[in-house]
Image (cartoon, helix red, strand yellow):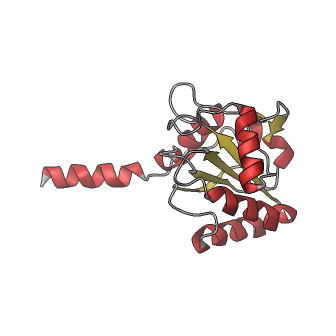
């Protein structure tokens, strides 16, 4: 019985959301863009922001297409999509230029992309540490194409694992709800 209880606590604790008082909001973070230009989340204040760690050699790479559609369909409705290339899962070995060329050539990506960075571990970008501290373990990318949705209030609205496509009804429903807030 003890083992069942421990497994239960681990399973549901893994998906727990933090109860932080949000000493900081997402708008306080900056990323270096894939071409060197600064991506300052402050510039997207009062927008819904979708932050997705991406990789070119992942089984979920076709989600770039859905992300581009999301960006195209909602950018005029205060939504921003930001792709964050990472090699944390050993599926993005290329340089920033190679990543940019791959995204443009294969998926016509024109939403903002950061330079390649770490999203987990001791060298994780501060944004990802902040998301974890304020939203809990569900904000930690377990694989590529993990999605963190930032509401217009600058707080994590929800997170989605790699298996949830950006075109899924559940994902779109949250985006539309957050845009209306």
Instruction: Write down the quadrant of residue 32 in the picture.
Output: top right
Horizontal and vertical percent position of residue 3? 16, 50
Residue at 62%, 58% (x, y): give it.
63
- In the image, 88: left or right of 54? left
Q: Is residue 19 left or right of residue 10?
A: right
Looking at the image, residue 53 lies above or below residue 33: below
> Residue at coordinates 72% horizontally, 53% vertically from top-left?
106
The quadrant in which residue 25 appears is: top right
Residue 8 at x, y percent in the picture:
27, 55
Q: Is residue 156 left or right of residue 144?
A: right
Relative to 51, say whether 68 is above or below. below
Q: Residue at x 65, y 37 (%)?
A: 127
In this view, 108 is above or below 169: above
Q: Residue at x 57, y 25 (%)?
A: 123
Q: Nearer the viewer, residue 61 or 126?
A: 61
Residue 164, placed above or below residue 55: below
| View extreme (left): residue | 1
Q: Quadrant of the N terminus?
A: bottom left
Residue nearest the observer in this picture, 140 or 65: 65
């Amino acid at each position: 019985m003890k083992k069942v209880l421990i497994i239960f606590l681990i399973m549901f604790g893994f998906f727990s959301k933090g109860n932080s008082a949000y000493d900081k909001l997402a708008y306080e973070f900056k990323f270096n863009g894939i071409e060197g230009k600064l991506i300052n989340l402050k510039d997207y204040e009062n927008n819904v922001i979708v932050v997705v760690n991406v990789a070119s050699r992942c089984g979920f790479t076709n989600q770039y297409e859905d992300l581009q559609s999301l960006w195209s369909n909602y950018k005029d409705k205060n939504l921003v999509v930001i792709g964050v290339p990472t090699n944390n899962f050993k599926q993005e070995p290329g340089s920033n230029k190679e990543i940019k060329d791959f995204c443009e050539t294969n998926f016509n990506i024109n939403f903002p992309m950061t330079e390649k960075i770490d999203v987990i571990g001791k060298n994780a970008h501060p944004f990802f540490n902040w998301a974890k501290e304020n939203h809990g373990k569900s904000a930690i990318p377990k694989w590529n194409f993990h999605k963190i949705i930032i509401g217009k209030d600058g707080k994590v609205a929800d997170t989605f694992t790699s298996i949830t496509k950006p075109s899924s009804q559940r994902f779109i429903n949250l985006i539309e709800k957050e845009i209306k807030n």
